[in-house]
Structures are given as structure tokens and as C-alpha cells.
Image (tube, rainbow, N blue to C red):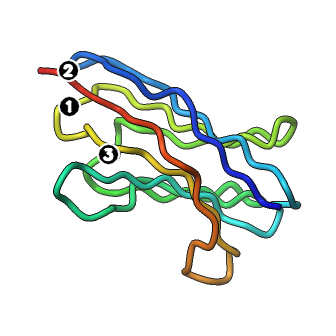
Amino acid sequence: QVQLVESGGGLVQTGGSLRLSCAASGRSFSSYTMGWFRQAPGKEREFVASISWRGGGTAYANSVKGRFTIARDYATNTVYLQMNSLKAEDTGVYYCASRISSTMNYDYWGQGTQVTVSS
């Protein structure tokens, strides 16, 4: 049973930082890519960042480049999203997801963690 459990969300002021964690379990993720997505109130869910578990290749949405960093930890099967210089528009529910690296569809999702950036 695959499980993705996010944590680390909260309330932070504009310009502040948060680090989100996604604990992955239930299978070997070596052939998978892990992604972070977010959904703001009244908006569609959008891609934030991704990382290839095996090669470590990363991708970022233009809106977060230079401010967010995605990383993985093999020892703990955890994916992190370090978020710096947070803006009000970064507010939303952040979700962790996984997909087979050779495909485009994310097949497993976490329950989400709320990030609120106050101005």
C-alpha cells in the first residue's frame, strides 16, 4: 500500500520560509519521480516542482524558480520542498505525488498540507 504523507505546512509571513516533507512508503520509488503540487482557493491544482528519485533531476514552475528547492533523502524515503521568500500567492494546499518516471501521470497523492502566507 503506497502512502505519501505530507507535513510541515503552517502560517508564515511574507518573506518567510517553510520546509515541507513528504514521507513515502509502500514500494521502491527508485524508478519514480516525485512531485509537489498546490491548489489555492478557487483555483485549479498546479505543478510546483518535481525530482527524479534515481537521477535527481529537478523541474520547477516558473513562479517558484530561485525560491523553492526540491530534494530527496534515500535513507528516510522522504522528499522535501524548501520554500524561501514566500509570497501571499504561494498560499494553498500543497500535495505530494508520485509517478513512474517514464510516464506523465501522477498515480498516488498525499492528503495535502496547508500553507498560508500572510502579508
Disc 1 from disc 3: Cα separation: 10 Å
Q: What is the number of the mark on residue 101?
A: none
Question: Residue at 58% of width from left, 52% of height from top?
Answer: 110
Give 90 or 62, whichever is nearer the viewer: 90
Q: What is the number of the mark on residue 87?
A: 1
Is residue 95 shown left or right of residue 56? Answer: left
Residue 39, x across and y down, in percent: 31, 53
| Structural crowding at the residue carrying mark 1, measured as other residues with C-alpha within 10 Å and reported as few (<14), some (14–19) or many (≥20) | some
Tell me: residue 44, above or below residue 77. Answer: below
Q: Quadrant of residue 44?
A: bottom left
- Reading the image, the residue beneath label 3 is 64
Q: Quadrant of the N terminus?
A: bottom right
Is residue 118 shown left or right of residue 39? Answer: left
Disc 2 from disc 1: Cα separation: 5 Å
Question: Residue at 76% of width from left, 38% of height from top?
Answer: 73
> Residue flagged by tag 3: what amino acid is it?
Val
Judged from this view, the residue extending furthest toward the left is 119
Q: Quadrant of the C terminus?
A: top left
Q: Mark 2 or mark 3, which has the lower sequence index?
A: 2
Residue 117, x across and y down, in percent: 24, 26
> Residue flagged by tag 1: what amino acid is it?
Lys
Q: Nearer the viewer, mark 1 or mark 3?
A: 1
